[in-house]
Image: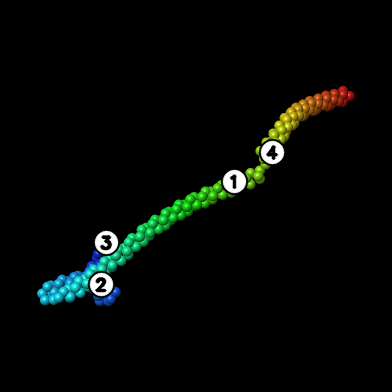
Amino acid sequence: DEEALIKKRLLTQTTTARPGADPPVKKLTKKYVAYVNALAQDDGDGDGTEAERAREAWLKEIALYEFNMGRYRAVASANAREMEQYASASAAVDGEVRGTKDEIAALKADLDGARLDRQHKEEYEALRRLCVQFPSRSNTTARLASLEAEIAELETESEATASKLDLRKKQFALLLHLVNELQGELAEEAATEAAEADAKATEE
């Protein structure tokens, strides 16, 4: 985690303000060892001055280390806040993206519905124009009634004409019959007259 990462950085840090300088933990350890050695030396034959200087140097190193630790904590806290802000901003952006996607989907559905409505209107308009080309129902009904009346009248006239034609056929047949009878009678009369004329000629 973040704390373990900071500890590892402190223990392994090689980049400091001065190139080639020791990491903070190593410097602190050296100051402590120097202080312990100075105490041991002063206990032997010194007056404590060297131990006091080593102690001051060690305390300064401790203060510097604590200062660096506070700085690292501040940086870590700032980084944590930035991460929280980033997470919040990322969540807000994700929400806006989802909202935008939903809005796009809704607009697409509206567009598809509008296109379908337009298609239906165009089809209706085409049918309306087609219907306008034909007469109205009332006109068609009136025309059909007129045609039916004309058909009925023609049928009546046809029946009357057929009756007249049948009568004419009968009259013509009777006429032919009378003509044939007349021709027969005339032939008989002519034959009788011829016979009578022959008879008279023979008597003379």
Q: Secondary structure at mark 1?
A: helix
On the rendered structure, is 35 left or right of 168? left
Q: Which mark is residue 139?
A: 4
Q: Secondary structure at mark 2?
A: loop
Q: Amino acid at mark 2?
A: Thr
Q: Circles 1 and 4: CB distance less than 8 Å?
A: no
Disc 3 or disc 4, which is closer to the eye?
A: 3
Q: Which residue is mark 3?
A: 3
Q: Secondary structure at mark 3?
A: helix
Q: Amino acid at mark 3?
A: Glu
Q: Which mark is residue 75?
A: none
Could you tell me how far apart the alpha carbons at marks 2 and 1 are, in whole angstroms? 83 Å
Disc 1 or disc 4, which is closer to the eye?
A: 1
Q: Which residue is mark 1?
A: 124
Could you tell me how far apart the alpha carbons at marks 2 and 4 are, in whole angstroms? 105 Å
The answer to which of marks 2 and 1 sits earlier in the sequence is 2
Q: Nearer the viewer, residue 201 or 98?
A: 98
